Image (cartoon, grey):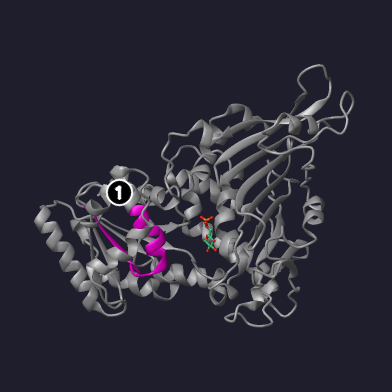
């Protein structure tokens, strides 16, 4: 049976960790979103599984408040969806629960007279029970030659290179790469999914997407809240593991890889791996790390105020790293990864700065800059130098602007998890992480993390909750090739004529 078979009617989806936060906030709402939009048949059976003793009704009451119901019709769909959901309480480490789960699925299959039993297992679970559950599922609930099984697992896929490889070694004999879907939810975000078509369906971009034209690249992740409540968990992780090794690296590979021969999942992932192999080791002397302190007005706590955190913790809640890609296309182009918690805003974007215009007829003209905003409010805008309209010969910075809110106001843009669960149901692996990607990215990050967590670790620079980051940030960016444009000269989006007036160079 082909692994790209689409799971359509009578699929059984089992959500492990059903009583936990991830399932409540992301997995079940995503399944409802797919149902609401007509991408999940009402013949689907959804079984929540966890250790907590809950009734079906208690589970439904827990998950319902997070469903998005923008219309009257969608409100009415909630009950219809919940009819598809049941719950099984059972242990993760002994056979009984799995045997019960298997017989429940077999009863569904018999009642709906399916020829093939297709099962999707979603593990919304901490890594400590990953392999136990994966092993028991394989032994007791896999349909064998009676159908297909797919298993979705959530990060973290290891803590460093050795643990990532150990996890892989445990999983590989149980579940083939074909059956395994490692989720990185950034790959389900609309603008991230747009990177491949945007880059490769626009011929003029291919001509300038290289070191002859591009001066620097910055990928930044900013969150306006700290680790409140989960400091204890975050303390052994830090921002680099939390979002850089996975989310930002995935974005980076899509921005910088060569053109895949097709949209085929292996073709795309082969190119990502090739790009990853060209990244040079991080220069540990060129990193800027920070940790947030109390907000200036004292209303928000500092990282160390969290009682679950070690009082002398050097945990990095902000980091800026610069890497180099050692291939013909990118040699000499610095790539800055920047991520932080408890900052002044929530925003994830890619900034690509082009080389300066040659002087002569112009001088001191601003660099062109392409900004791809992943969230909030998906947008792409290219900063352009044009003549100020009217009786003027001055040059001003303006933009070619694709803001999804205005251009695509009527479109349904799926949540990342909706998009990825749908990909998995269709058997499409392109937006999931392959095992060799993990080996290479952990190979790059592990020496840096060992340094930052070892005896010679630098003390992270303090920054106030709600600020832009540590004081050295602007200098760091400048030193590494990213030039800030004066906000008095250019702002996006431009809304009033006087801003245009101010934007004269
Ligand atoms: C998760 C991190 O993977 O991504 C969180 O563990 C982070 O710390 C989250 O907040 C960000 O995801 P999003 O979709 O809100 O940008």
Image position, residue 116 (x, y; %): 17, 52
Q: Residue at x 54, y 72 (%)?
A: 162
Q: Identify which residue, 206 or 280, lies in the foreground.
A: 206
Whether residue 201 is situated above or below residue 152 in the rendered picture: above
* Residue 24 is covered by the magenta coloring: yes
Q: Label 1 CB, ligand 1: below 8 Å? A: no
Taking the image as drawn, is residue 427 in sight?
no
- Where residue 454 sits, quadrant-wise, is bottom right
Image position, residue 251 (x, y; %): 57, 49
Image position, residue 236 (x, y; %): 58, 75
Where does label 1 land, which residue?
75
Q: For label 1, count other residues whose C-alpha is less than 10 Å away and answer few (under 14), some (14-19) or many (20+).
A: some
Image position, residue 65 (x, y; %): 36, 59
Q: Please report the bounds of the magenta region as a residue range.
A: 11-31
Q: Is residue 75 left or right of residue 461?
A: left
Q: Secondary structure at mark 1?
A: helix
Whether residue 281 is situated above or below residue 397 in the rendered picture: below
Taking the image as drawn, is residue 111 in sight?
yes
Dividing the image into 4 quarters, which one contains the C terminus? top right
* Residue 373 is covered by the magenta coloring: no
Q: Identify which residue, 130 or 50, lies in the foreground.
A: 50
Q: Is residue 61 left or right of residue 417?
A: left
Q: Identify which residue, 334 or 64, lies in the foreground.
A: 64
């Amino acid at each position: 049976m082909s692994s790209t078979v689409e799971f359509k009617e009578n699929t059984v989806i089992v959500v492990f960790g059903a009583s936990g936060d991830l399932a409540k906030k992301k997995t079940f709402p995503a399944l409802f979103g797919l149902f609401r939009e007509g991408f999940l048949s009402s013949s689907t059976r959804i079984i929540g599984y966890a250790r907590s003793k809950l009734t079906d009704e208690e589970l439904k009451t827990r998950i319902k408040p997070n469903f998005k119901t923008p219309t009257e019709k969608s409100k009415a769909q909630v009950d219809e969806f919940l009819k598809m959901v049941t719950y099984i309480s059972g242990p993760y480490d002994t056979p009984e629960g799995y045997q019960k789960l298997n017989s429940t699925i077999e009863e569904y299959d018999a009642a709906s007279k399916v020829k093939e039993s297709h099962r999707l297992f979603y593990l919304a679970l901490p890594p400590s029970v990953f392999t136990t559950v994966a092993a028991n599922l394989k032994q007791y609930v896999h349909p064998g030659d009676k159908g297909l099984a797919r298993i979705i697992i959530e990060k973290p896929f290891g803590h460093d290179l050795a643990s990532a490889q150990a996890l892989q070694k445990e999983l590989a004999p149980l579940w083939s790469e074909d059956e395994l879907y490692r989720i990185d939810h950034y790959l389900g975000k609309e603008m991230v999914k747009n990177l491949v078509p945007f880059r490769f369906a626009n011929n003029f971009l291919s001509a300038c997407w290289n070191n002859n034209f591009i001066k620097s690249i910055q990928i930044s992740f900013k969150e306006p809240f700290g680790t409140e409540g989960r400091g204890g968990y975050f303390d052994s992780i830090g921002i680099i593991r939390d979002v850089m090794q996975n989310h930002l690296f995935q974005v980076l590979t899509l921005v910088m890889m060569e053109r895949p021969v097709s949209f085929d999942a292996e073709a795309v992932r082969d190119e990502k791996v090739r790009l990853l192999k060209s990244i040079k080791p991080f220069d540990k002397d060129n990193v800027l790390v920070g940790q947030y302190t109390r907000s200036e007005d004292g209303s928000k706590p500092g990282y160390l105020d969290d009682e679950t955190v070690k009082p002398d913790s050097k945990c990095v809640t902000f980091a800026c790293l610069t890497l180099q890609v050692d291939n013909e296309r990118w040699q000499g182009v610095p790539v800055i990864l920047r991520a932080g918690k408890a900052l002044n805003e929530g925003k994830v974007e890619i900034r690509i700065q082009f080389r300066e215009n040659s002087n002569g007829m112009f001088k001191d003209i601003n660099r062109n800059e392409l900004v791809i905003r992943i969230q909030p409010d998906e947008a792409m805008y290219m900063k352009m130098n044009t003549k100020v309209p009217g009786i003027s010969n001055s040059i001003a910075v303006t933009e070619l602007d694709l803001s999804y809110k205005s251009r695509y106001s009527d479109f349904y843009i799926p949540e990342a998890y909706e998009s990825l669960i749908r990909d998995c149901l269709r058997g499409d692996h392109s937006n999931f992480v392959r095992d060799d990607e993990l080996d290479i990215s952990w190979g790059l990050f592990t020496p840096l993390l060992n340094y930052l967590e070892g005896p010679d670790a630098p003390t992270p620079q303090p920054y106030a909750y709600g600020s832009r980051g540590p004081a050295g940030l602007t200098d760091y960016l400048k030193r590494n090739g990213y030039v800030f444009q004066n906000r008095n000269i250019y702002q996006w989006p431009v809304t009033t004529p006087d801003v245009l007036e101010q934007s004269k160079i």
